[in-house]
Image (spheres, rainbow, N blue to C red):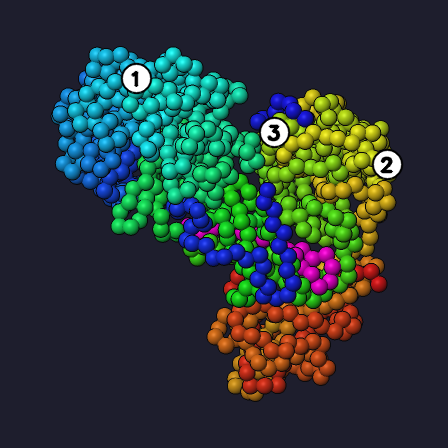
Amino acid sequence: MRRSRGFAAALALSLAGTGAGAVLGLVPQAAAITPPVAFTADALSTWQPNGVVWALAEAGGTVFAGGTFSTVRPPDGSGGAEQSAVNFAALDAATGAPTSCHLSFTVGAGTATVRALTLSPDKQTLYAGGYFGAVNGTPVSSLAAIDVATCTVKTGFRPAFAATVRALAVTGDTVYAGGDFFTVAGQPRQRFAAIDAADGALRPFTADADEPGRAVEVTPDGQNVVLGGDFFTVNGTNTHALAVVDATSGALTKTYAGFIETNSVVKDIATDATGFYTANEGTGGGVFDGRIALNLSDFNQRWRDTCLGATQAVLPYQNVLYSASHAHDCSSVGEYPDGQRHHLLAQPTTGVGKLGWAPDTNDGIGEGIGPRVMTVGSRGGVQYLWVGGEFTTVNGSAQQSLTRFASTGDTGAPTVPVATAASFRPGEAQVRWRTSLDLDDSALTYRIYRNGSGTPIATVAADSLFFKRPQASWTDTTVAAGQSYTYRVTATDAAGNTSALSATASVTVPTSVDAYPDRVRADGAQLFWRYDDASLPNVADSSASGNQNGVHLNAPALRQTPGAVSGASTAIGFNGTDTRVYGDQRQTIGGSYTIETWFRTNTTRGGKLFGFGNNQVRGSSQYDKHIYMTNDGRLVYGVYTGATRTITTGAAYNDNQWHHVVATQGPGGMVLYVDGAQKGTLAVTTHENYAGYWHAGGDSLGAWPNPPTSEFWAGQLDETAVYPSVLSAAQVQNHYALATAPADSVVQVQAAEDTYANAGAPDGNYGGSSSLAVRGTSLYTSYLRFNLPAAPAGTVLKSASLSVKTSTMSGAGTADTVSVVPVTGAWTEAGTTYNNRPATGAAALGSFAGVPDGSAVHTTGLDTAALAGALGTSYGLALTSPGTDALWLWSSEAAANEGTPQLTLTFGAP
């Protein structure tokens, strides 16, 4: 539904594999930066002006910067003294430091500024335009020619511009200028003019515009000049903001009446071998703020990027168009919705899709625009992309008005993945993570490590962009029922920069199918948020293949208990003010779908439980396919078809009890179910068609019937799912019934005491040691004591396993079999020695068939019946081995609880 914001204001990976060490979804190894991007996103140390940089140009490894400033200073945190630089600086392209070339652009009255810089084709002459009356004391009139070799003003070049020059382009013999002027050398020339490149004499070229000129570019063949600016006419003919004119006469070659919105202007134009590109800025509604690519062959449009956010500069380089803007809304081209500003972007010169390069600045001083100009410099075989403007930070660090990025030396590692793990049936464990962010590498490699091993069990390749970070996942099919596993994930870019390990994701594999989530997955859910996440900001998707993760906004309350369904799964809590979850994947919804969630609340302010909207962090302007609660606790399910179409329950459900709600739409119309029972139908088979995101806990509700006081939900949600089909009444009822089905419970018990006996030191006690040892000859035996819980009421012990972790010492593993046997004699951690070691039973309860070197967790199943008989008591286990190859383990005394021996006990219905 289209409405004003009610709030204060498609790449999905499904990566599943089988078997240890599987390599999944691999792509060819990329260069240090994901092609076709040519520069890293790592900002280099660069001297910085104290004002705004409006213009950049490069010659022979020197970058010239012009603008409105008076000094340049060293990068923050480095040595050196501030230097005078009056509206101009020359800097080494490779070091970012000032050169010996010093020029001062001044004016007798007003504020001098340099607004345009360009080099002659042979790069021997630098032309500077702006508003100034002298360069190093030599009189000039808003346009000067500088000898690059000597850094001196060419006194023979004496054009006279009566107002600010904002844009320059040059051929071998002609300089083209655009700006605010009405006369040049006393002759009428309105906003555009051409002068002789050697002496500044006025050329016959006439392209008079009615509003300021801001951009000038000569086509590669030299036959035409492309003009950009604020104008509505050129030479009396309607052509707004853009025109192509003859390079000699200024006569119109191509006009663009009605081509660009009247409230938009062209701020910059750049060309390559095949086309020219415009940077547009607008104001007001219906604005065009983006970029246009036009063909040189016919001067017609190739593509148009309608992102909103005042584009200031464009730079085509090696088939990539780099742009400077504050793009905050690219939803119109299928990318991110209105929200955070992004100031530097890259896209292929053939289309609008953004590439994996997104360093960022802030808006900065002055107009708060951010970056305004770009150029490429080269030195020593390395290319440097220089960016100037009015920003005061780059990639979050202090840096004013100038920055640069190199073609080599990518040093930035991807962000650390946020990993979780879940298991719904014996033999499978799903590892999930939100793909990482790397500002110059969109193709990343993820390595999954199990049980602390230093060798990955699987490798997955997945793509991500700053606005498109889908969940990636991998299924471990080598896990054993009843045993616990830990997983950690790293992300590596093409240059080999690797993130830190993710936090540990732990999972215990059930001994029987977990009925409720297994059925949701089997019935085809493509989004399944169980809300078991232990940390912000990622909400894992537990569906079998959807990988539609969510993102927490404003920190909702995690791991709320009890959850809606039996077992250990938890719920999420929303405060009714500003917390919610939004989907990370932009999508459109087909004609058939089902949305399902559990909820609990006692609110009297209503709110949206779950629904679809076209924004993420801000309130949506299109929103339907949603379930919301009125102030009196009734539920409303609605879609928008040009009018709101709703089903409303007669009963209230704000009784602080868990309830199950399902809404479906398909060829049979709309149906609403609560707690397994049908509550209403409506013969409506359509809804509003737009691209958007799923939301839990709140989104816009303006103009919907019986609107609640709050659009945010105050209460708990659990087990939220979306299906691309209509669930039948029987399926809905089955889901409701399964929520109370018995589920296994898992208890993990760490060793209360542990020590080992050493035949080499018969009277030695090792109760305080951080290590445990096992060997047959000469003997080491380790002893573990566990305080076993009683079985929860109505359950029995279904499985038991022991986990230990090898230490980091060299050769900690063993080639020998290690047996787990019961301890039959008395012992204490503090008192046990080899001489008084306790007796042990002969029958093994479990065993490790050799343990490889490398610190990692190893698990073995134990005899369930033996441990079942000891529930509720203190129970001892010993680790023994017949051979001569010692096994070294961490004990409970290890630093930071590194690897305390642990029992995992699974209880379930008899």
Query: Crowding at label 2, few (<14), some or many (≥20) Cα neighbours within 10 Å?
Result: some
Q: Is residue 157 visible?
A: yes
Q: Earlier in the sequence, mark 1 or mark 2?
A: 1
Secondary structure of the residue carrying tag 1 is loop
| Quadrant position of residue 157 | top left
Distance CA(mark 1)–CA(mark 3): 50 Å
Amino acid type assigned to the residue bearing label 2 in the image: Gln
Q: Earlier in the sequence, mark 2 or mark 3?
A: 3
Q: Which residue is mark 3?
A: 619
> Which residue lies at the image location 69% right of the left edge and 67% below the top edge?
480
Secondary structure of the residue carrying tag 3 is loop
Instruction: Please identify the quadrant where the C terminus is shown.
Output: bottom right
Amino acid type assigned to the residue bearing label 1 in the image: Thr
On residue 751, which mark appears? none
Check contact, mark 2 vs mark 3: CB within 8 A: no
> Which residue lies at the image location 85% right of the left edge and 31% below the top edge?
680
* Magenta residue span: 412-430
Q: Which residue is mark 1?
A: 206
Secondary structure of the residue carrying tag 2 is strand
Between residues 528 and 683, which one lies in front from this camera angle? 683
